[in-house]
Image (tube, rainbow, N blue to C red):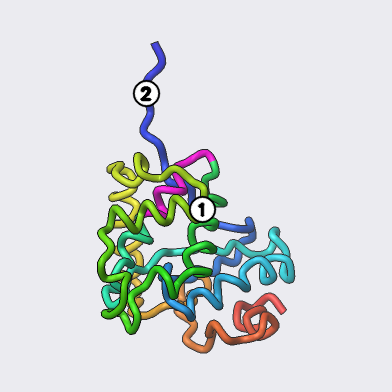
Amino acid sequence: MPVATEPRCAPLIWGRGTTVLDVFIEPTCPFSATAFAKFPELIATVGEDRLSLRINLHSQPWHLFSGVFVRATLAASITAGGRDAAARVLREVYARRDELEPVGHARGPALDRSPRAVLARVEEITGLALAEAFGQDVVTRAMTRHARFSRQNGIHVSPTFMVDGLVNDRMGSRDEIGTWVAEIGLA
């Protein structure tokens, strides 16, 4: 009789190089959105064989539904689409930040939404069925790992960049790809 196995969250890693760039992002942070949009170009520029880009989800309480979006992203990672489904959630949430995040973090119609309604909207905009995965213990454990990793590395804001285990505070979301490449040490 086959043994049932618990689903696993797919690692949010692009590339397979020995240089590791950890980026700590929040799903509704506009600066994280700017950085996230540049990740494909960064990988294409340096090559998948030279860089491993690892996304770490960094929930921030001033973004009211941050935890719901982090959980939805990790829930997507246990679906058949894995890390690409998780990236889809991030892409669609970033694209609709003004609709999904309360105005000024504490005003507007988004305040009337429940976490369940927020999740339903994420499912609608991504086309992904996430409700079942959203409630799984494996997602809770993944959220805990992401939060612990951020705290252990002294991460307070997003996006924060860490190259081979060392935070690089010279890197920012508005930098050109060439600046990132030089800061990572792959120029």
- To which quarter of the image does residue 119 belong? bottom left
- Residue on which the image places disc 1: 126
Q: Position of residue 40 (x, y in %)?
A: 66, 66
Element on which disc 1 rests: helix
Q: Position of residue 102 (x, y in %)?
A: 33, 75
For residue 3, the mark is none
Q: Can residue 155 be spotted in the picture?
A: yes
Foreground mark, 2 or 1, reads 1
**Distance Cα–Cα, label 2 vs label 1:** 28 Å
- Residue on which the image places disc 2: 4
Q: Residue at x 63, y 58 (%)?
A: 15
Under mark 1, the amino acid is Thr
Under mark 2, the amino acid is Ala
Say few, some or many: other residues with alpha carbon within 10 Å of mark 1 (under 14 / 14 to 19 / 20 or more): some
Q: Residue at x 60, y 83 (%)?
A: 183
The span shown in magenta is: 72-80
Specify whether 144 is left or right of 8: left
With respect to residue 59, does 122 lie above or below?
A: above
Specify whether 158 is left or right of 54: left
- Residue situated in front as seen by the camera: 111 or 152: 111
Q: Residue at x 64, y 64 (%)?
A: 51
Q: Position of residue 148 (x, y in %)?
A: 29, 63
With respect to residue 184, does 144 lie above or below?
A: above
Q: Residue at x 53, y 69 (%)?
A: 95
